[in-house]
Image: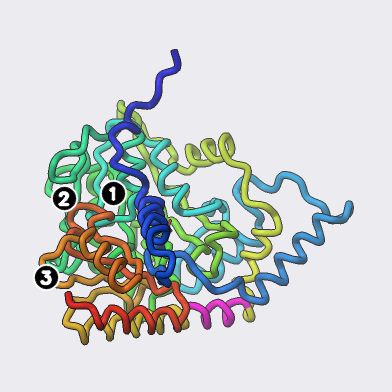
Amino acid sequence: MAQINENYLKLQAGYLFPEIGRRVAAYQKNHPEAKIIRMGIGDVIKPLVPSVIKAFHEGVDEMSKTESFRGYGPEQGYDFLRNAIVEHDYQTRGVNLHSDEIFISDGSKCDSGNILEIFGPDNKVAIQDPAYPVYVDSTVMGGRTGNIQDNGFYQGIRYMPCTATNQFMPEIPTGKVDIIFLCYPNNPTGTTASKDELKKWVEYALKNKAIILFDAAYEAFISEKDVPHSIYEIEGARKVAIEFRSFSKTAGFTGTRCAFTVVPKELMGYTSEGKAYSVHALWYRRQTTKFNQVSYPVQKAAAAIYTPEGRKETREIIEYYMENARIMRESFTELGFEVFGGINAPYVWINSGTGMKSWDLFDKILDEAHVVGTPGSGFGPSGEGYFRFSAFASRENVLEAMNRIRNLSL
Ligand code: MLT
């Protein structure tokens, strides 16, 4: 008898974004005339930029000739991409990493979920609430929780509420936790953490031999000068943090798939007897067993983001999305909503102040304005009452969506 992993039975409904897709599809079926504007999932709409496409084509052409054809690539990714990452994403910010510490992957979603496999089942996991649902769901799948309770919290997870009351900055845990998920710029709230704030987390992790899983997938959208782009800008972080970065939003790779994870060589985890063990070695072992890298043309395309042309072109697209975010911020502010995010991240996080539940607001906005957002409670109980709009939309759709919402009575 094949037994299933019963931890999966603890999961609630479907994964958030397919669940939204299902509801929208059902609505569209019953209202075929509705011109629905989708600003729910953070999925890019602009095509890959010319330099990326050129490199992508070259990579494909190389695969067509015997002399330039490539089979399996290096386990952690090609040097040309890892070296470009080290130079442009880190050295320019005074962070020294070795290219051996970079693991190219097909997405931060996969990596931030899979990474839990290399840690023991008894670790206490702390997660911001609301949060990107992958962190909680993967913690549940790995058997590190009990059942979900009536208040929406799983037993066994240390939730760290992030609301307007604490400026979306979780408090340092009073007790001991072992693994801490932090996401900055934050998805879903669009808020950021200062260097001083991150410093407190690094100090906590050093003191408690904890590990910070730092999701920096939205780093490229930071516009304010003093906001840190990497956890490694904080002294000591190499000893306690893993960082996830992605080309998905930065350069429109949601469909192309390429990202990377940084695991510094000094980072140690511990056996139950307290013996230190290299986390880098474990992740290397896991990835070489279960993953065969991103295709050569895709890695070549990703490296083109770091050329002068590629940087200029991707920057223009980021600015386009961030102008959308600005328009959304202003519109919701004028409507009297409490508005967060949208300055250093492509998400605008709003609170209508009406006391309306997130899913009720979702239904109302879908039904009356034919606009799709993401209900805050879908990201965790502390997101209740909030709503997220993604700036990854055409300007025309953003303006139209804001007009339609302006005419709603909320
Ligand atoms: C989001 O909308 O939160 C993200 O697009 C989902 C993802 O990146 O997987």
Query: Which of 240 and 224 lies nearest the eye of the viewer?
Result: 224
Residue at 10 percent across and 66 percent down: it is 355
Tag 3, which secondary structure? loop
Distance in Å between CA atoms under marks 1 and 3: 33 Å
Residue at 31 percent across and 66 percent down: it is 366
User: Of the numbered discs in the image, which one, if any, rests on residue 180?
Assistant: 1
Query: Which of 398 and 86 lies nearest the eye of the viewer?
Result: 398
Residue 33 is left or right of residue 107, and the answer is left
Q: Earlier in the sequence, mark 2 or mark 1?
A: 2
Horizontal and vertical percent position of residue 405: 28, 78
Residue 180 forms part of the magenta stretch: no
Query: Which of 164 and 226 lies nearest the eye of the viewer?
Result: 164
What is the magenta range?
310-319
Q: Is the N terminus in the top left, top right, bottom left or bottom right quadrant? A: top left
Residue at 37 percent across and 36 percent down: it is 119
The amino acid sitting under disc 3 is: Thr
Q: Nearer the viewer, mark 3 or mark 2?
A: 3
Residue that carries the numbered disc 3 in the rendered image: 354
Q: Is mark 3 within 8 Å of ligand 1?
A: no
The residue carrying pointer 3 sits among few (fewer than 14), some (14 to 19) or many (20 or more) residues within 10 Å by Cα, namely few
Secondary structure of the magenta portion, mostly?
Answer: helix
